[in-house]
């Protein structure tokens, strides 16, 4: 995955991915440009999935008690 993608926040990567999808749906790109955009979009999607997984893991670690059960207290 390109370094410029790995340095993006989840929000920035998602925003760029949304722009790429919109451009591809528009259908006004030349074939080579569409392929390049699709490849970047796939890398951005993968990056977003990785960031979401990392966030889920962190939240799970925060809510998990020492005995392994989940702490289901509401967060205020």
Image (cartoon, rainbow, N blue to C red):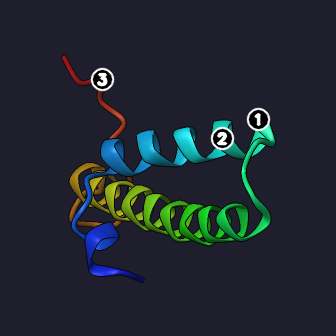
Q: Could you give the CA–CA distance between mark 1 and mark 2, rounded to whole angstroms? A: 5 Å
> Of the residues tagged 3 and 2, which is closer to the observer?
2
- Label 1 element class: helix
Q: Residue at x 34, y 64 (%)?
A: 54
* Left or right for 23, reference 9: right
Give the residue displayed 30% in from the left and 23% down from the top: 74
Q: x, y percentage for residue 47?
A: 44, 66
Using residue 11 as the reference point, say whether residue 20 is left or right of it. right
Q: Residue at x 35, y 63 (%)?
A: 57
Q: Which label was assigned to residue 74?
A: 3
Q: Decide: marks 3, 2 in contact (CB < 8 A)?
A: no
* Disc 3 to disc 2, C-alpha distance: 41 Å
Q: Which residue is mark 2?
A: 23
Contact between marks 1 and 2 (CB within 8 A): the answer is yes
Q: Residues within 10 Å of mark 2 (few under 14, many from 20)?
A: some
Secondary structure beneath label 2: helix
Residue 69: x %, y % from top left: 38, 58
Which residue corresponds to the image point at 61% horizontal and 62% vertical from the top-left?
37
Residue 71, numbered label:
none
Camera-near label (1 vs 3) is 1
Q: Which x, y percent locates residue 10?
A: 34, 50
Query: Label 1 vs label 3: CA separation?
Result: 44 Å
- Which residue lies under the disc numbered 1? 26
């Amino acid at each position: 995955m390109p370094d410029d993608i790995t340095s993006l926040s989840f929000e920035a990567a998602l925003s760029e991915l949304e722009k790429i999808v919109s451009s591809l749906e528009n259908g006004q790109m030349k074939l080579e440009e569409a392929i390049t955009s699709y490849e970047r979009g796939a890398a951005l999607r993968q990056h977003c999935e990785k960031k979401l997984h990392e966030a889920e893991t962190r939240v799970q670690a925060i809510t998990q008690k020492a005995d392994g059960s989940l702490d289901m207290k509401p967060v205020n």
